[in-house]
Amino acid sequence: MRLTCKLYLNYAGYCLAKANHAVKGEIQRDIQFKALYGLIEHPVIGWILFDSGYTRRFYDATSNWPNKIYALATKVNVEEQDEIKYQLQKAGISPNEVNHIIISHFHADHIGGLRDFPNAKFYCSRSAWQQVLNISDFFAFSKGILKSLLPQDILERLFFIEDIAVEKYDEIFGKVYDLFNDHSILAFHLPGHAAGQIGIQLQTAQRSYFLVADACWDKRAYELLYFPHPIVKVFFHSWKDYKESIDKLRIYWKKNPTHQIIPSHCSLTTDCFVSANIDMDVL
Ligand SMILES: [Zn+2]
């Protein structure tokens, strides 16, 4: 029997993007890339976050050159009430109670809130962190990374899924990581958009969810093989890996028609799953 968790999804800010960049051939118009996060209630270990959205710290982090280029290229909109910390407190959950944060990858729209959760351990792939270490502070913005958003004590609180999770075999993805060794949350490598990006799969009382972060921006990537505009390749870590991840997601989607795949920025998918107030019994 699969250990079930509870899941809540909502946004923490958004940025403006071009529809025809997200999907080649779309008309040219601005769309909102909403910063999705997942709040998971695990029956034993409590509150877990999947990604941590934008926070207003983005504005400080991009107030000077060269990071200013990031803010000029990516119009971000986040106010206090959009931040996860605020949303949790409104629901009576203290940020101090969040013990675990799974980081899909280190782009600013996924790690903006890390500093609001002083008791959380962080989980990511080894290669995702390696990229953060390897890239210079000066050029990090060009890969979507703003190092000042990271907590100062991150090294003491960061764990690699390859080290701490029980590794299993999956016929589509190869390696799968049983994060808490209880078959509640399974992590998968989904590289391409960013180095070492991961997604997680979990089961609620209602159904299975596969949170795939930015493995694709739009569900039509795995459903119809509609890909982003080639112009975005410069921001991607590896186009080849991206396509391989999409191929795997496509196989997963065909094999598991009752599972809900959740790409972080695909409003077509996510808008019907989010709700303004935290309710752990809907999804
Ligand atoms: Zn993103």
Image (cartoon, rainbow, N blue to C red):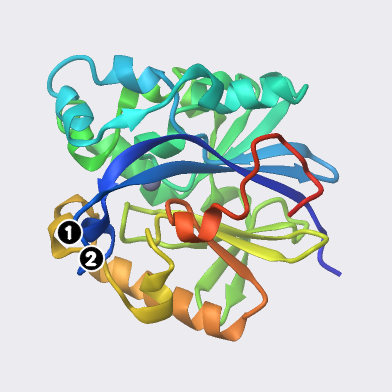
Residue 161 rendering spot, x and y as whole percentages:
55, 51
| Residue 282 as seen in the image, left or right of residue 18 | right
Mark 1 or 2 closer to N-term? 1
Residue 252 - label:
none
For mark 1, does the 10 Å Cα neighbourhood hold few (<14), some (14 to 19), or many (20 or more) residues? Answer: some
Residue 258 rendering spot, x and y as whole percentages:
67, 76
Is there CB contact under 8 Å for labels 1 and 2? yes
| Residue carrying label 1 | 233
Badge 1 element = helix
| Residue carrying label 2 | 239
Residue lying at 29% horizontally and 40% vertically, measured from the top left: 16
Badge 2 element = helix
| Residue 98 as seen in the image, left or right of residue 77 | right
Residue 152 rendering spot, x and y as whole percentages:
44, 17
For mark 2, does the 10 Å Cα neighbourhood hold few (<14), some (14 to 19), or many (20 or more) residues? Answer: some
Quadrant in which the N terminus appears:
bottom right
Q: Amino acid at mark 2?
A: Trp
- Report, in whole angstroms, how far the alpha carbon at label 1 lies from the one at label 2: 6 Å
